[in-house]
Amino acid sequence: MKSSNIGGQAVLEGIMMKNGNQYAVAVRKPDKEIAVDIQEYNSVIPFKPMMKIPFIRGIFNFVDSLVLGMKTLMFSASFFEEEEETEVELTEEAIAKKEKQDKLLMNLTVAFSVVLAVAIFMILPYFLSNILRKHITSRGVITILEGVIRLAIFLGYILLVSRMEDIQRTFMYHGAEHKCINCIEHGLVLNVDNVRKSSKQHKRCGTSFLFFVMIVSIIFCFFITAESQVMRVVLRIALLPLIAGVSYEIIKLAGNSDNYFINLLSKPGMWVQNLTTKEPDDGMIEVAICAVEAVFNWKAYLAENFGMEFPEEASGEEAEMADHKIVHTAGQTAEPAGFTERTVAEGQQI
């Protein structure tokens, strides 16, 4: 396996793929065509050198992932708004106002999500385990029980949301995302057949990252010895950035190594991925391939890392005729501002 360093996430009826500072969102629209939006992502973190410092970069990457994830999720949802809303022609002033409102909503949603996650997965397990202090005097045992409760809440949450129909489809797109990356990282040509037979599990998955956050938090909580209950809660919250930073380094190491011990360490997180990834259908695989190809030259990657050779691309009129089924449009009022669409008919050979 050769790491490609590309990553992504599932969105509503689609896939986001990111390579460096460029990302693409491919969405299967209600009319069954695939819309692809390619953008440059500017980090919300102003201190660029901090993005390269081990253990600190993980904190900033996590924040960027939350912001980009919410942004692309809102973009994909825009295709499924009520038809009468999408047909309204907006003035430039109205578009600017809507963009400002969307940005504010996105920031508030991210902030609320972080606060809610901390409350459910960090603070709640502490108070639940604290109930047992009357019967268990060992601080170490209580800390382990807190970690077990945290894992149980995490897995229970995933099992609960996975029963929703829309989430099930999102998990299928999540599987398609992993399969595409595994396909090229294992030296296979990126097409529907090869993607279908590739694994839906990947060591760099966000699910594995969250699982490691749960495990690493248990280790860090052993070092919290404050007597005050308030301080114990405050220290758990204060340690979260460091826990995220350590977990990020573990995931990064796992994604770039085939070491036996690293693979063994990755196994539990990949087992959890069985809950968050499902086998996609061919249409979902086509969407994932479109997202990959929009930001990543997989042919050059296979040539460099696996010695594979590909015929030179056609140019001029030949390329135009060969690509006649792919329609490029821009500036449509029905789409989000600044959107450039690449539409692919359903079932078309990718």
Image (spheres, rainbow, N blue to C red):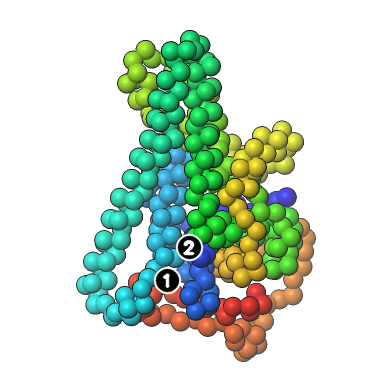
Q: Position of residue 45 (x, y in %)?
A: 38, 46
Q: First in sequence, mark 1 or 2: give its number.
A: 2
Q: Is residue 31 above or below residue 273?
A: below
Q: Is residue 225 above or below residue 213?
A: above
Residue 254 appears in view: no
Residue at mark 2: 12
Q: Position of residue 59 (x, y in %)?
A: 44, 39
> Callout 2 environment at 10 Å: few (<14), some (14 to 19), or many (20+)?
many
Q: Nearer the viewer, residue 300 or 167?
A: 167
Q: Position of residue 61 (x, y in %)?
A: 46, 45
Residue sitting at x 44%, y 15%? 133
Residue 190 has which mark?
A: none
Mark 1 and mark 2: Cα distance apart in space: 9 Å
Q: Nearer the viewer, residue 147 or 216?
A: 147
Residue at mark 1: 79
Q: Position of residue 28 (x, y in %)?
A: 52, 71
Residue sitting at x 46%, y 18%? 132
Amino acid on which disc 1 is placed: Phe
Q: Is residue 4 above or below residue 203?
A: below
User: Secondary structure under badge 1?
Assistant: helix
Amino acid on which disc 2 is placed: Leu
Asked if the residues shown at circle 1 and circle 2 are in contact, with their CB atoms under 8 angstroms apart, the answer is: yes
Residue sitting at x 30%, y 50%? 108
Q: Is residue 211 above or below residue 303?
A: above
Q: Which quadrant of the rendered structure holds the C terminus?
A: bottom right
Q: Quadrant of residue 117?
A: top left
User: Secondary structure under badge 2?
Assistant: loop
